[in-house]
């Protein structure tokens, strides 16, 4: 079958939705299907290319909010790409995320060509730029965009139960979940063939605890509270380290701390992220907003004890406090208390084993890609009826 995926961002632009699109594409190809991804050219990449077997078409765009909100341009490249798309017949269209003009384009394109289509929502709250007025305007805009999107697509899914619940905010009843996931076999292989020791590189004794974070270095991820909590614990005489992997606008602020116990690693390759997590003891993601964090799944696969906020799919991975710690808020006091509790928990090893098993049984790309095929059959049967 030929699958068509509209995703506003795609590799080499980094992010959760980008990895989600990439991994389901790779699995569908592994099963013998063809996949075409239509995305935005936020990275000056080739407009048309074969990316690891995936047909990728990148539309020229206005790169707003540092690539977080691309708006495609209707130019010659746009016409060229749509003409090439029209030369193929597609069996199913997947639209990743709901609040982009790119999503509207995907819905209208598949609607006019009578291609069965779904939207997979990855959000659990409105996009924020940390300005009350602009956030209000953004929320109103998102409601208008979603209302327009609903004219062309009626089948919406969430990347987590929290995403499905968020859809109700827009008077949309989710058809179910198509979960975020990881390639557990790949991660295990990387762990077995580790070529880099972060503990040795940064002279961290084996008995010292490492708190890790991977992801965008932006305010809504709670990274500042995490760093302040670690520093507070260290000032009390309990020496711990914090390793932070990722890029973002807060990187320079974190580097200015010049704290030897706060190690800013920048952007790492996937392999090095796994190496780092394999040497970490506790993973902390005190985020304001998540769809379903890939970082949590990767940390669980690397046997980290997890501390996170009640956002996105956190409670679907950590069912109760025997799996890890889920806190309601990411204020400094809450993050500090959670890390202190994690440091002193005697059941950490049991929790680590339980959450690893839960990820293995529920959140791998094999499971998610098979769910995509099930949803395809449901959508086709619905069209026939």
Image (cartoon, rainbow, N blue to C red):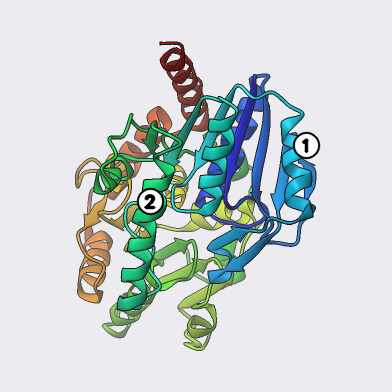
Residue 292 visible here: no
Residue 226 visible here: yes
Q: How many marks?
A: 2
Question: Quick one: label 1 or label 2, which is nearer the N terminus?
Answer: 1
**Residue at 33% from the left image edge and 53% from the top image edge:** 306
Expressed as whole percent of the image width and height from the top left, the position of residue 161 reads 29, 39
Front residue (pair 121, 283): 121
- Whether pointer 1 and pointer 2 mark residues with C-beta atoms closer than 8 Å, the reply is no
Residue 205 vs residue 267: left or right?
left
Front residue (pair 147, 155): 147
SS at mark 2?
loop
Expressed as whole percent of the image width and height from the top left, the position of residue 224 reads 38, 77
Residue 65 vs residue 150: left or right?
right
**Residue at 27% from the left image edge and 65% from the top image edge:** 339
Q: Which quadrant of the figure contains the N terminus?
A: top right
Tag nearer the camera, 1 or 2: 1
Residue 360, compared with residue 285, is above or below; it is above
Residue 17, compared with residue 214, is above or below; it is above
> Toward which corner of the image does residue 22 lie, by quadrant?
top right
Q: Which quadrant of the figure contains the C terminus?
A: top left
**Residue at 27% from the left image edge and 63% from the top image edge:** 343
User: Dot 2, crowdedness within 10 Å: few (<14), some or many (≥20)?
Assistant: many
Expressed as whole percent of the image width and height from the top left, the position of residue 259 reads 47, 85
> What residue is disc 2 on?
123
**Residue at 26% from the left image edge and 68% from the top image edge:** 330
In the rendered structure, find residue 84 and report the number of the disc placed on it: 1
């Amino acid at each position: 079958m030929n699958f068509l995926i509209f995703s506003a961002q795609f590799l080499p632009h980094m992010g959760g939705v980008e990895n989600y699109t990439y991994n389901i594409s790779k699995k569908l190809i592994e099963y013998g299907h063809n996949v075409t991804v239509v995305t935005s050219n936020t990275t000056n990449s080739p407009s048309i290319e074969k990316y690891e077997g995936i047909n990728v078409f990148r539309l020229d765009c206005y790169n707003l909010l540092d690539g977080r909100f691309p708006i495609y341009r209707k130019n010659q490249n746009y016409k060229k790409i749509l003409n090439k798309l029209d030369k193929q017949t597609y069996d199913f269209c997947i639209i990743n995320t709901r609040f982009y003009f790119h999503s509207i384009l995907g819905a209208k394109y598949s609607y006019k060509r009578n291609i069965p289509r779904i939207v997979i929502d990855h959000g659990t709250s409105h996009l924020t730029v940390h300005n009350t007025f602009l956030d209000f305007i953004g929320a109103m805009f998102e409601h208008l965009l979603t209302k327009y999107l609903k004219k062309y697509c009626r089948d919406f899914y969430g990347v987590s139960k929290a995403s499905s619940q968020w859809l109700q905010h827009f008077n949309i009843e989710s058809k179910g979940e198509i979960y975020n996931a990881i390639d557990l076999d790949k991660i295990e292989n990387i762990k077995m063939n580790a070529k880099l020791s972060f503990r040795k590189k940064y002279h961290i004794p084996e008995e010292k605890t490492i708190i890790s974070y991977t992801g965008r270095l932006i305010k809504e991820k709670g990274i500042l509270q995490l760093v302040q909590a670690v520093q507070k614990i260290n000032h009390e005489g309990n020496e711990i380290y914090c390793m932070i992997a990722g890029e973002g606008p807060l990187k320079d602020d974190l580097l200015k701390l010049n704290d030897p116990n706060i190690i800013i690693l920048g952007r790492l390759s996937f392999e090095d992220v796994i190496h780092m997590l394999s040497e970490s003891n506790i993973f902390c993601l005190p985020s304001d907003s998540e769809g379903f964090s890939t970082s949590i799944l990767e940390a669980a696969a690397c046997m980290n004890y997890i501390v996170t906020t009640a956002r996105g799919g956190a409670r679907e991975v950590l069912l109760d406090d025997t799996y890890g710690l889920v806190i309601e808020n990411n204020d400094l006091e809450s993050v500090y208390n959670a890390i202190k509790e994690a440091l002193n928990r005697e059941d950490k090893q049991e929790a680590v084993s339980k959450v690893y098993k839960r990820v293995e049984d529920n959140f791998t790309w094999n499971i998610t890609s098979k769910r995509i095929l099930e949803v395809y059959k449901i959508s086709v049967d619905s069209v026939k009826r």
